[in-house]
């Protein structure tokens, strides 16, 4: 009997020790898990998300651009050489945007001003350099509803998002939001008008309607961390914003937009900072000029690549850096034919002096140098931290 009691008592002690061992080890494991969780939380809190963006102005194909890109033998177009020298800027950016004028089609006849109809080959090239999104312009309805539908199909096929023109009421309600890591950036687009052409359904085109813009910004701020409003507005060929432009951007800043960019004048307009109703500083680039088109009048052959970085950290989301890269559309003859190429101005000034841009004539270089100087003098504003970016 005693032996039995001793046996039972020994068993109880062993079981007790086993339970204590398992409980102790479980406690240690929980402690390690907690420490790991806290460590991961600290890493997440200290991590910053950044997005670098390239935004450029208008892309329109005039008759001279179409003729230059045409292969007379195959009757096909190619625009790869036009964008060759700027492709790296798009490819190296997280996100890139442009204003696309006219309608796109896979069948001719193609034409320039005043009713722009451009070949799908242009979109092939834009996809190739990595363009992500296009804002539509006052020529979005040049081909009517059919033109809008065809353009949208071509852009969708090439994975390029279209902003400010839509083929359904449902697509109009869906905001364009770019996300990288935990940072979300919304882009909204609006146009001053359609040159008198009818808009069959109001949801087809986002006009500059302040009531709609205010509602869109409120919704965008619910879905994103940073809101950029893109406006196609201003008087053509005027190098400074007019009163209406200034009043419009002030209201949009008051509504909560974090940044505003613009196009349409076909010349570069300055960059300013406006103060919103709640005291926030908002950068406004009134017009980024012409990125690519056939216009050759003074100032119309130049544009800028706006380069900016948006950062999100535990302190909030902000515009971390902003600058610009001047560009010029070179027109020159090669193999007996007129050619066009978008050049980063400062980079090609250096290449020319090194003898590495032999396709440029002396008069080309003189014009390149002139446009570069005019752009820098027009845009540099150290007081607001806006200066030429490094190439």
Image: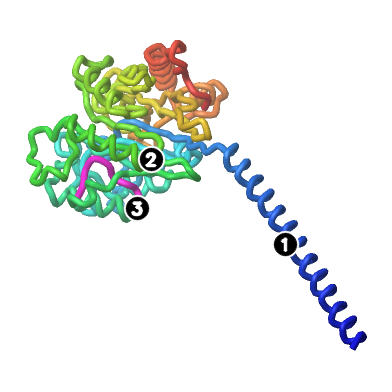
Please say whether residue 263 is visible from this viewpoint: yes
Q: Secondary structure at mark 3?
A: loop
Q: Can you say whether 345 is above or below 51 in the image?
A: above
Instruction: Give coordinates of residue 142: x percent, y percent.
Output: 14, 41
- In the rendered view, would you say 188 is above or below 4? above
Residue 26 place in picture, x, y as percent: 72, 62
**Residue under pointer 3:** 158
Identify the residue shown where x is 7% and y is 40%: 198
Give me the disc on residue 224: 2
Q: Nearer the viewer, residue 308 or 76?
A: 308
Name of the residue lying farthest toward the right: 3
Residue at which label 1 appears: 26
| Main SS, magenta residues | loop
Q: Quadrant of residue 256?
A: top left
Q: Check disc 1: other Cα within 10 Å, few if <14, some if 14-19, many if 20+.
A: few
Sequence-first disc among 2 and 3: 3
Q: Residues within 10 Å of mark 2 (few under 14, many from 20)?
A: some
The circle drawn on residue 175 is: none
Determine the residue located farthest toward the bottom in the rendered image.
1
The magenta stretch spans residue 161: yes
Q: Position of residue 91 (x, y in %)?
A: 48, 42
| Residue 341 shows in this picture | no
Colour mapping used in the image: rainbow
309 inside magenta stretch: no
């Amino acid at each position: 009997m005693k032996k039995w009691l001793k046996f039972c008592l020994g068993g109880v002690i062993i079981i007790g020790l086993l339970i204590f061992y398992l409980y102790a080890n479980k406690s240690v494991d929980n402690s390690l898990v907690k420490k790991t969780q806290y460590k991961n939380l600290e890493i997440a809190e200290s991590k910053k998300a950044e997005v670098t963006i390239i935004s450029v102005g208008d892309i329109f194909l005039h008759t001279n651009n179409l003729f230059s890109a045409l292969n007379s033998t195959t009757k096909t177009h190619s625009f790869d050489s036009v964008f060759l020298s700027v492709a790296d800027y798009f490819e190296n950016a997280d996100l890139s945007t442009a204003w696309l004028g006219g309608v796109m089609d896979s069948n001719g006849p193609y034409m320039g001003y005043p009713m722009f109809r451009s070949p799908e080959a242009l979109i092939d090239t834009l996809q190739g350099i990595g363009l992500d999104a296009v804002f539509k312009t006052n020529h979005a309805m040049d081909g009517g509803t059919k033109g809008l539908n065809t353009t949208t199909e071509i852009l969708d096929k090439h994975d390029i998002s279209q902003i400010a023109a839509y083929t359904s009421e449902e697509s109009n309600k869906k905001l364009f939001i770019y996300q990288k890591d935990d940072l979300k950036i919304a882009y909204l687009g609006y146009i001053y008008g359609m040159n008198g052409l009818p808009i069959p359904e109001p949801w087809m085109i986002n006009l500059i309607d302040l009531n709609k813009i205010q509602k869109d910004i409120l919704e965008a701020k619910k879905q994103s961390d940073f809101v950029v409003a893109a406006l196609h507005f201003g008087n053509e060929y005027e190098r400074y914003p007019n009163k209406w432009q200034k009043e419009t951007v002030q209201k949009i800043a008051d509504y909560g937009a974090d940044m505003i960019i613009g196009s349409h004048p076909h010349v570069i307009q300055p960059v300013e900072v406006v103060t919103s109703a709640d005291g926030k500083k908002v950068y406004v680039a009134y017009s980024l000029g012409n990125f690519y088109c056939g216009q050759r009048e003074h100032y119309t052959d130049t544009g800028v690549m706006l380069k900016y970085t948006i950062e999100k950290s535990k302190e909030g989301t902000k515009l971390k850096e902003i600058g610009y890269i001047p560009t010029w559309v070179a027109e020159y003859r090669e193999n007996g034919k007129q050619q066009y190429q978008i050049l980063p101005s400062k980079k090609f000034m250096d290449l020319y002096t090194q003898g590495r841009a032999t396709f440029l004539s002396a008069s080309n270089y003189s014009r390149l140098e002139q446009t570069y100087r005019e752009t820098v003098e027009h845009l540099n504003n150290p007081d607001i931290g806006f200066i030429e970016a490094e190439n």
